[in-house]
Image (cartoon, helix red, strand yellow):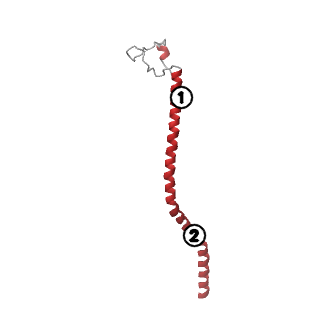
Amino acid sequence: MSPGKRLRSAALSLLIHGALLLPLRLREVLIILVSVLCNPLYKSLRIVGHKVQNTVNSVLIFFAYFIGVGVSCLLSRLMKEDPLGMRSKDTGTFWRKKETSSETVNDLERQY
């Protein structure tokens, strides 16, 4: 092979490979450019997103607590129930008498 043919072959090869690599290089440059430009925007949007998330969660928890606990409290007061037994019965003590059960020892063995 003559030196001229080798030079033309090398130039053609470089031209072909350079043309094939150009879109990759352009893509890499665009990715770097977008990441440099969008990184501060992304960080600021994350901060705003966290603040919005905290606000929405606080509002939802507020309403869930006051609606859930408030409604159940009002219903129990309307029905005059005392599920925890906290209202005093003027006995001077909060101890309760234990109710006796009619279970025998044989009933209590091997419960499982």
Q: CA distance from mark 1 to mark 2?
A: 63 Å
Rendered position, 4 above or below 83: below
Q: Do callouts 1 and 2 mark residues in contact (Cβ within 8 Å)?
A: no
Rendered position, 46 above or below 101: below
The N terminus - image quarter: bottom right
The residue under the point 53% across, 35% down is 64
Q: Amino acid at mark 2?
A: Leu
The residue under the point 51% across, 46% down is 53
- Asked whether 52 or 36 is in front, the reply is 52
Rendered position, 17 above or below 65: below
Q: How many marks?
A: 2
Element type where label 1 sits in the image: helix
Assess disc 1: are there few (<14), some (14-19) or many (≥20) residues with their C-alpha within 10 Å of its C-alpha.
Answer: few
Quadrant position of residue 4: bottom right
Q: Which mark is residue 110?
A: none
The answer to whether 86 appears left or right of 12 in the picture is left
The residue under the point 53% across, 39% down is 60
Q: Amino acid at mark 1?
A: Val
Residue 51 x, y percent position in the rendering: 49, 48
Q: Which residue is mark 1?
A: 71
Q: Earlier in the sequence, mark 1 or mark 2?
A: 2
Q: Which residue is mark 2?
A: 26
Asked if residue 2 can be seen in this view, the reply is no
The residue under the point 53% across, 21% down is 78
Residue 58 x, y percent position in the rendering: 49, 41
Rendered position, 27 above or below 110: below
User: Extreme left residue here?
Assistant: 92
Residue 112 x, y percent position in the rendering: 51, 22
Assess disc 2: are there few (<14), some (14-19) or many (≥20) residues with their C-alpha within 10 Å of its C-alpha.
Answer: few
Quadrant position of residue 8: bottom right
Element type where label 2 sits in the image: helix
